[in-house]
């Protein structure tokens, strides 16, 4: 047993010496070449392209990493190389590299196929490394596309040249288009693809050229890429690309401006030039007529550059006499495509006379709220079809035609010659303008016509008087309607006050010898009335409201009635006087005044809850009005006019006539009017400093002006007077009554 173990160990050791040690030595030789000085060994890294093309130089990058910085290296190669501008033919002639760590070697293959190469790098210490490389060398050819155009219309074909440069090897070449384009080659039109290429044949010369016609695929494509692939019979593939624009033809259109030019005016032709790509330059030539472009005059036959932008270009021509037609010939040229595009166009100018237009109102003045008729007449002497667009440019008028309303800014249309009546609806009173803009589609001309109108203001007026008389006018006094309720003929109505066209109040006293009193109210403009009787046994002479809810009625023996609910109920307010009170006026909601007999003046500063009494004269005071919070006027029965400039603290007499003054009205702070029992009408335009007297036949009881020009007076025997010129003249209105009229109230509607 022991002897066997010893023999076994001996055999294993012999096998180890026979096989393992030689193997280790071989491995060591392969990984690390034998050196004379192991401390100065180095390593090598090669970087290159293994697939090369014949006659096309390529670079081999050589990197050396060594432990000795003073080592110098040399190279022996079996292939021709270039290093530092020196050529080595590959016969193992050493190439001295130097002591750098990185080198670039140029290899230019001279043949095709698999080319083995051996590179041996050694240093001056005897160290050496050998590297082997197998290059795959392909045959050489190149493709170059050329053309003489950069823009191609859809209607054109473009000639394309192909140059194939080879290394002289005879090969068969095939062609296909990358984008499946259509080409014509040798009079054959087809689409050549990878599955069905065009067989070009065998070329034997180093440089071969052929041409074909390209047919545009689609228009409106900028920078279109046309790609051709050439494949030889060895499978080598070369391609080249052309960039060009595939264009649509230009679109030119004449737009006449206007369709019918007006004699004596320049006529403008709008030349609409358009191509979707919006590139290129356009040229315009007028062949038989001078023209104007960009305010520059050009003679007949001149050519101008319109620019490179799609646009509508205005070309101006001068018109001749009416009826003389003028034919104009011109061209538009586009020089961008391969073949210049020339658009030849002709148009005819036929001048006509400018149309006439007139507007005539039925009346130069009418009352607000009523209608007037405007006659519109438009005439074109030439026998042409046209549409007239009439725009209402009157800011203060509505127009109506064929039962349709046209507000300011609205337009109506008429065909050919026009002779129509248009209704006018004024939107305010005063002096207004009728302004119409008339546009003719045939001549494309605008005309603005206008005329002036005087629209009298519309006054809603109520007049009351004896025997229960209540009259109403809704048209400034032209027509009057009796609107008194039944059963009040035994009352003489003394005062009326309306706060709007619907709500008003009337007071009166019995005329049958009793002491009955009456207060009437309406909320529908007098259509219906509410009656309140005998709230006091004292004669009521005046009514006034300083707000829609708060009102006052005053009368004999110091009577003051007050309401704070719009007249639904009334309460007696202490006046601290027994004098007969005849008029009431409020400057604002808090400050008010009442006047009466024996120079009595009552004042409130708390909205009428309490009143203070003072005596300012010995005469009966009949009317009062303030034009500012400080300046006010009072009339009396003896013909005196009193004025205050300090809110009623003191009063002074500024004028006296020999008659009882009964009514007062100031439409402005400076202009005022007063009427008297004997028919005097007084006017002041300077806040009462100077008064002008007029005498009218009749007894005048009350006066009211709704503005500086329009005023009304009522008096005995149904008298109603009106002025529209600031009392320069008066005319009598038909009231249809002979009863005494005592008071007037009015609401201005504008």
Image: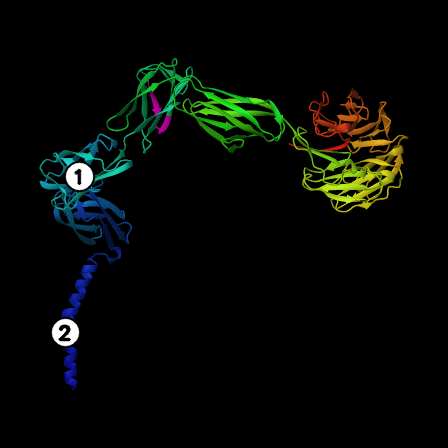
State the residue position of label 2.
Answer: 14
Q: Residues within 10 Å of mark 2 (few under 14, many from 20)?
A: few
Name the residue beneath numbered marker 1: 142
**Residue 224 shows which numbered tag?**
none
Q: Relative to the observer, which residue lies in front, 135 or 20?
A: 135
Say whether residue 317 is left or right of residue 345.
right
Q: How is this picture coloured?
A: rainbow
The main secondary structure of the magenta stretch is: strand
Q: Looking at the figure, which quarter contains the C terminus?
A: top right
For the point 14% across and 80% down, the residue is 7
Tell me if residue 748 can be seen: yes
Q: Is residue 586 visible?
A: no
Residue 593 lies in quadrant: top right
Looking at the image, which is closer to me, 455 or 345? 455
The image quarter in which residue 648 lies:
top right
Q: Quick one: SS at disc 2?
A: helix
Instruction: Specify start and end residues of the magenta stretch as a single range.
Output: 303-312
Q: Marks 1 and 2: which is nearer the front?
A: 1
The picture quadrant where one finds residue 742 is top right
Up/down of 60 relative to 226, above or below = below
Left or right placement of residue 131 versus residue 411 in this view: left
């Amino acid at each position: 047993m022991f002897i066997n173990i010893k023999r076994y160990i001996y055999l294993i050791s012999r096998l180890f010496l026979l096989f393992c040690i030689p193997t280790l030595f071989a491995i060591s030789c392969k990984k690390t070449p034998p050196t004379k000085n192991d401390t100065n060994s180095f390593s090598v890294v090669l970087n290159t392209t293994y697939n090369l093309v014949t006659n096309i130089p390529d670079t081999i990058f050589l990197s050396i990493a060594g432990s000795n910085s003073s080592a110098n290296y040399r190279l022996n190669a079996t292939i021709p190389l270039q290093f530092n501008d020196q050529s080595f033919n590959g016969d193992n002639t050493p190439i001295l590299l130097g002591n750098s760590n990185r080198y670039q070697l140029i290899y230019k293959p001279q043949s095709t196929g698999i080319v083995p190469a051996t590179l041996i790098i050694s240093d001056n210490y005897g160290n050496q490394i050998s590297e082997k490389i197998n290059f795959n060398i392909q045959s050489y050819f190149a493709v170059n596309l050329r053309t003489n155009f950069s823009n191609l219309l859809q209607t054109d074909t473009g000639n394309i040249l192909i140059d194939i440069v080879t290394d002289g090897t005879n090969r068969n070449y095939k062609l296909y288009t990358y984008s499946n384009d259509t080409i014509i080659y040798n009079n054959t039109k087809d689409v050549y693809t990878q599955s069905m290429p065009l067989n070009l044949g065998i070329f034997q010369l180093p440089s071969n050229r052929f041409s074909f016609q390209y047919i545009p695929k689609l228009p409106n494509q900028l920078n279109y890429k046309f790609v051709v692939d050439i494949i030889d019979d060895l499978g080598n593939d070369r391609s080249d690309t052309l960039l060009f624009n595939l264009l649509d033809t230009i679109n030119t259109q004449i737009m006449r401006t206007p369709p019918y030019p007006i004699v004596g005016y320049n006529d403008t032709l709008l030349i609409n030039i358009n191509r979707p790509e919006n590139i290129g330059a356009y040229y315009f030539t007028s062949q038989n007529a001078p023209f104007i472009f960009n305010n520059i005059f050009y003679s007949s036959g001149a050519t101008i550059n319109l620019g490179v932008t799609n646009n509508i270009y205005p070309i101006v021509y001068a018109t001749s006499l009416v009826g003389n037609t003028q034919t104009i010939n011109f061209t538009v040229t586009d020089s961008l495509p391969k073949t210049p595009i020339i658009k030849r166009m002709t148009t005819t100018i036929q001048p006509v006379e400018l149309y006439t237009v007139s507007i005539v109102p039925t009346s130069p003045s009418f009352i607000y709220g009523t209608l007037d008729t405007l006659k519109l007449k438009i005439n074109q002497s030439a026998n042409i079809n046209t549409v007239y667009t009439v725009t209402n440019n009157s800011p203060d008028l509505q127009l109506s035609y064929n039962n349709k309303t046209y507000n300011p800014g609205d337009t109506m249309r008429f065909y050919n010659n026009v002779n129509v009546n248009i209704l006018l609806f004024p939107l305010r009173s005063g002096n207004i303008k009728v302004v119409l803009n008339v546009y003719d589609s045939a001549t494309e001309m605008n005309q603005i016509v206008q005329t002036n109108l005087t629209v009298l203001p519309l006054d809603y007026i109520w007049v009351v008087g004896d025997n229960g008389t209540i009259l109403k006018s809704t048209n400034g006094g032209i027509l009057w309607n009796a609107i008194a309720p039944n059963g009040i003929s035994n009352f003489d109505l003394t005062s009326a006050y309306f706060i709007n066209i619907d709500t008003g109040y009337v007071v009166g006293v019995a005329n049958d010898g009793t002491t009955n009193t009456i207060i009437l109210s309406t909320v529908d403009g007098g259509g219906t009335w509410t009656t309140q009787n005998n709230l006091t046994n004292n004669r009521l002479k005046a009514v006034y409201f300083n707000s829609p809810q708060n009102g006052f009625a005053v009368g004999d023996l110091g009577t003051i009635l007050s309401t704070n609910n719009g007249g639904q109920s009334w309460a007696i307010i202490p006046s601290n006087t027994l004098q007969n009170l005849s008029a009431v006026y409020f400057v604002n909601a808090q400050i008010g005044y009442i006047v009466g007999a024996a120079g009595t003046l009552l004042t409130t500063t708390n909205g009428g809850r309490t009143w203070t009494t003072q005596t300012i004269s010995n005469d009966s005071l009949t009317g009062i009005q303030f034009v500012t919070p400080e300046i006010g006027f009072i009339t009396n029965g003896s013909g005196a006019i009193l004025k205050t400039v300090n809110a009623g603290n003191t009063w002074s007499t500024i004028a006296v006539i020999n008659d009882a003054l009964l009514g007062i009205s100031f439409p402005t702070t400076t202009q005022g009017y007063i009427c008297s029992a004997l028919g005097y009408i007084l006017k002041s335009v300077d806040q009462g400093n100077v008064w002008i007297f007029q005498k009218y036949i009749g007894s005048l009881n009350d006066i009211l002006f709704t503005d500086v020009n329009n005023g009304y007076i009522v008096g005995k025997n149904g008298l109603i007077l009106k002025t529209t010129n600031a009392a320069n003249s008066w005319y009598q209105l038909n009231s249809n009554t002979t009863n005494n009229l005592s008071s007037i109230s009015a609401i201005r509607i504008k």
